[in-house]
Amino acid sequence: MVVRVRVSEIFYSLQGEAKTVGQPTTFIRLTGCPLRCHYCDTAYAFQGGELQTLDDIVDKVKTYPTKLVTVTGGEPLAQPDCLPLLRLLIQEGYRVSLETSGALPIASVPDAVSIVLDLKTPGSGEVHRNLYENIAELRSKDQIKFVILDKADYDWARFKISEFDLNARVEEVLFSPVYESLTPVRLAEWILEDGLEVRLQVQLHKLLWGDKPGV
């Protein structure tokens, strides 16, 4: 049986976030997401897209000059055949990261994949969707991201770091201000005041090209 997934876009750009920020990366954005975060910047991926075979996707990825691949969404794990896609990319020799909301189980994600798990804050409107069992599945190569809307989100995230001892569990804890809602300077001040062991990220791709698809 030919396996297909619904793809919103495949593009080549600089990684804008996480530990490989600034590095040339191929992005595979899968269609669909069960969440509706208030500040979502990829709502265009909720529907539409094109059904593509896994082989066609890998053939497209091979046209770009990088071995870094990020599978994102939407919520990529909302499509069950995301897992075979991840396995095929690994088999083809790519370094693969997966960006996931954390609302769906990650236990079956291949060990070689670097997971970036977005733990939803209250300001997202989807905090009740967090599947906290996922935290036990994370490894030292993985990352946890908090998208921060305001001081209440920041304080909530700081508490979760302590509650789950996240600095000891994952390679990076990432704090990202909601684009055009919380200034990076304000978030930086809070981090410095509290001496948090986190990485502030500012979505490099938006600074370079603006808030639009395909970057």
Image (cartoon, rainbow, N blue to C red):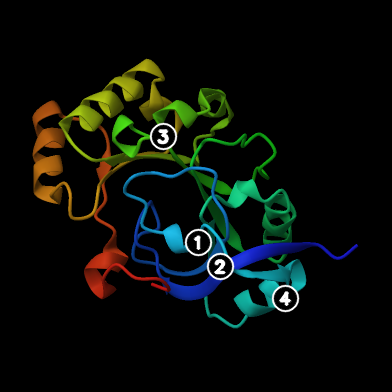
Mark 2, Cα crowd under 10 Å, few <14 / some 14-19 / many 20+, is many
> Is residue 90 toward the left or the right of residue 130 in the image?
right
User: Does residue 173 appear to the left or right of 170 in the view shown?
Assistant: left
Q: Nearer the viewer, mark 1 or mark 4?
A: 1
Amino acid type at image mark 4: Asp
Compare marks 3 and 4 and give the one earlier in the sequence. 4
**In this view, 107 is above or below 113:** above
Q: Residue furthest bottom?
A: 63
In three-dimensional space, the C-alpha distance between marks 3 and 1, rounded to whole angstroms, equals 18 Å
* Residue behind mark 2: 8
Residue 147 location (% of width, % of height):
31, 42
Vertical position of residue 201 compared to residue 149: above or below: below
Residue in the picture at 66% in, 43% down: 109
Q: Earlier in the sequence, mark 1 or mark 2?
A: 2
Q: In which quarter of the image is the C terminus?
A: bottom left
Q: What element carries label 4?
A: helix
Q: Earlier in the sequence, mark 1 or mark 4?
A: 1
| Distance from the alpha carbon under mark 1 to that under mark 2 | 6 Å
Count of numbered tags:
4
| Circle 3 residue | 126
The residue sitting at 39% across, 67% down in the picture is 23
- Marking on residue 45: 1
Residue 127 at what x, y percent from top left?
Answer: 40, 30
Q: Residue at x 35, y 56 (%)?
A: 17
For residue 194, what is the image quadrant? top left
Q: In this view, does 185 lie above or below 58?
A: above
Amino acid type at image mark 3: Glu
Residue 56's label in the rendered image is: 4
